[in-house]
Amino acid sequence: ARLGDMSAALRACRAAPALLRLASSSHEPRRARIVARAAKGAAKRDASSGLLSGVHPESVAAVSAIAERAQAASDRWGTEVTEFLDPALAADARAVIDRMADCEARPWGGYDRAERVRLVMGRREVLDGDGDDSFAALTDGANGCVALLQVSGNFMFDAADHRDFLGAALGAGIERDRLGDILVQGERGAQILATPPMAAFLSSAMTSVRKVPVAATIAPLTDLRVPPPRVDTFSSVEKSMRLDAVASAGFRMSRSKMSDLIAAGAVKVNWREGAKPKTECKSGDVISLRGKGRVEVGE
C-alpha cells in the first residue's frame, strides 16, 4: 500500500511541470496558469496522506523527486546522491524515505555537524558494503562526494563574512545546491564545502571576495577546521509561545527589536523563511537569527 501511495504522489508531482510546459507551448498564458494551479492542487491532495504526509507544502515537489531517485537506487541495487540540501528539505526527505521499504538516506556534508548535507540513498546492504557505491566510499575524504575548497586572502583590513564568500561563489555562476557549509576563518579567509566538480571549477574561477584577492585551492577534508559549538543552556518563563516572545528571550533582546528583525526576514523557524512575530513555537523548534546563531526551544 505504501508503494502505491508513493507512485500516485510521485505521478501527481511530476505532472505539474509537464502540464505547464504543454499549456505554455500553445501560447495560452491563462490556460497555463489554470493548468498549473490544478496540478499543484492535485499534488497537495496526494501529499496530505500517505508517503508525503507531513512534508512542508513548499517542499513537496522537491521531496517527491528525491524519493523517486531513492526508489530507483533501491530497485537497481545502487546508490543516488542528492545535491546539497538545506536542513529543512533534508529533514523532510529523510522522513519520507524512512517510510519506504528497502531504502535508506544517510546525510553527509563533509563533517558530522554539517547543516547543509547531501543524502546518500540506497539499500542498507549496498550502503554498508565495500564497493564504490558504499557510504564509506562516497564519504571518503579523498574521493568522496564532498570536496573542501580553501579560500585564502588577507582580510585584516577588509573583513568578510559568510554572505561575502557565498556571494563570491555564486557570482562565479554556480547554483546554491552545489555548495555546502561555509566556515569563515576570520582574517585568513574561509573554507567552503562543495561538490567535487564545483570545487574544481571555483579553484580557478574564484579570484576575489569583496575587493580582496584570494587564492582558492582544493584541500583534503582532513584540513577542515570546524570550530567547537558554543552552547548556552538557560531557562525562561514566557507568557506566550509567540515567536517574538520566545526569540527575544532566547537571543536576549527586546521584544520590539526582535519583531523588527522577524519582519525584516532575519529570523527563520526550522530553517524556513516567512515567519511572523505571531507564529506559535513549540518544543523542539529551532529559531535562527542571521549572524547570531540558533536557539532550540525546550520543554
Image: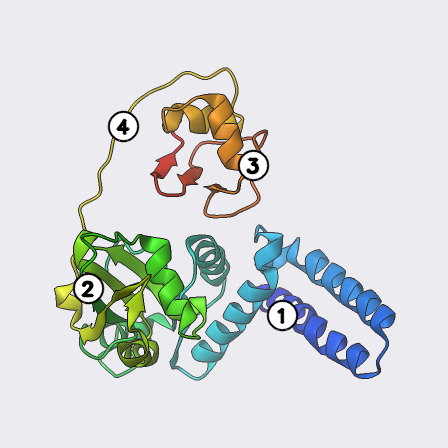
Density class for disc 4 (Cα within 10 Å; few <14, some 14-19, many ≥20) is few
- Residue identifier under label 1: 10
Q: Nearer the viewer, mark 1 or mark 2?
A: 2
| Left/right of residue 142 with respect to residue 125 in the rendered view | left
Structural distance between the alpha carbons of marks 1 and 2: 47 Å
Residue 120 found in image quarter: bottom left
Q: Which mark is residue 233?
A: 4
Q: Amino acid at mark 4?
A: Thr
Residue 293 point in image, percent of width and height: 34, 40
Residue depicted at x 39% and y 71%: 178
Q: Is residue 297 left or right of residue 280?
A: left
SS of the residue under disc 3: helix
Residue 66 in view: yes
Residue 153, label in figure: 2
Write the residue at 19% across / 64% down: 153
Q: Earlier in the sequence, mark 3 or mark 1?
A: 1
Vertical order, 263 against 62 (above or below): above
- For mark 1, give the secondary structure: helix
Q: Position of residue 96 (x, y in %)?
A: 51, 59
Secondary structure state at the residue bearing disc 2: loop
Q: Are marks 3 and 4 in contact (CB under 8 Å)?
A: no
* Front one among 217 and 72: 217
Using the rendered view, name the quadrant where residue 295 is placed: top left
Q: How is the image coloured?
A: rainbow
Tell whether label 4 touches label 2 (CB within 8 Å). Answer: no
Q: Given contact means CB atoms under 8 Å apart, are the residues at marks 2 and 3 in contact?
A: no
Mark 3, residue position: 263
Going from N to C along the chain, the mark reached first, 3 or 4, is 4
Q: Is residue 83 visible?
A: no
Lower sequence index among marks 2 and 4: 2
CA gap, disc 3 to disc 4?
A: 27 Å
User: Of the residues shown, which amino acid type is indicated by label 3?
Assistant: Ala
